Image: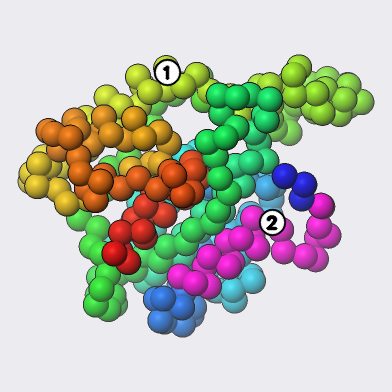
Amino acid sequence: PYLPERSNEELSILAEMAVKAARQAIAAWGKPVSEIGAVLCAASNMQRAYPAIAIEVQQALGIEGFAFDMNVACSSATFGVKTAADFIGGGSVKAVLMVNPEVCSAHLNFTDRDSHFIFGDVATAVIVESSETAGPGGWDVLGTRLKTVFSNNIRNNFGFLNRPGRDTDQLDATLADTTRQNDKLFVQQGRKVFKEVVPMVSTMILDHAAELNLDTQGLKRLWLHQANINMNTLIGKKVLGRDPEPEENVIILDDYANTSSAGSIIAFLSLIHI
């Protein structure tokens, strides 16, 4: 995408996207922003290191309290919801705004036929609050569990340490040449990712459901990361013990593509309105 640089007095691209999504979420919530005590910006790629995009969003919306960015790649929104729930459970705040502005197209190598076409750009927003203050129509968080495992099969090596690692003029020239700098953009080994993710995710869901005394065969919905329909179908089959029906394992890839962390939130919202 061509995104002209903005002055420091203008909202950044990510903040603008996040603010628009946040205002829609706040309107649906129906409460004043004064009840929000924290803002989390959870996304795969932050526009800058500092000031935090979350603090810029906080400023634009007139929210008191605190804000910070967090990056856990395509799991960022999931980790954001968990972090928000922990803040509320610990009594730090009554409500948390969690936003996920994702501009995936900006880190894609458009000469790579295996990856560039599967991504989309979007922003989502979720408000998490205490059950004591939540009105009707909300969703309860029964339990949360996080897990991370290091892998080189999805990687993006672009960052501020690239500059001191070589001559600046050389860096500027080579960054423009994607054929020589593929690792500074999104790279993945799809088959290896598939083999890593499917058993880890399905086992994690089954174990966590058992901990909560939930029968996974009776689950009505799965809102998985929207990465690959075959991956999601196989995870759904392992969790449900059978081939999932379309309304049980929600897929929105055909409409929105892979929007990284925002995908599972879009899938969640898509079924609420049906």
In the picture shown, does residue 138 fall above or below 209? below
Q: Nearer the viewer, mark 2 or mark 1?
A: 1
Where does the image place residue 234, in percent across and percent down from the top left? 26, 29
Report which residue position mark 2 lands on.
13
**Which quarter of the figure has residue 158?**
top right
* Colour setting: rainbow
Measured from the top left, where is residue 203 in percent x and y?
21, 30
- Quadrant showing the N terminus: top right
Q: Is residue 233 left or right of residue 239?
A: right
Q: Secondary structure at mark 2?
A: helix
Q: Which residues are magenta?
A: 4-25
When asked about the image quadrant of residue 239, the answer is top left
The answer for how far apart the CA atoms under marks 2 and 1 are is 33 Å
**Which residue was labeled with disc 1?**
191
The residue type indicated by label 1 comes to: Arg
Which quarter of the figure is the C terminus placed in? bottom left
Q: Is residue 19 magenta?
A: yes
Where disc 1 sits, the SS reads helix
- Which of the pair 254/127 is nearer the observer? 254
Above-or-below relation of 30 to 167: below
The residue under the point 13% across, 34% down is: 242
Which one is in front, 147 or 115? 115
Can residue 233 be seen from the camera position used here?
yes
Q: Is residue 50 above or below residue 156?
A: below
Q: Amino acid at mark 2?
A: Ile
Identity of the residue drawn at 15% across and 38% down: 240
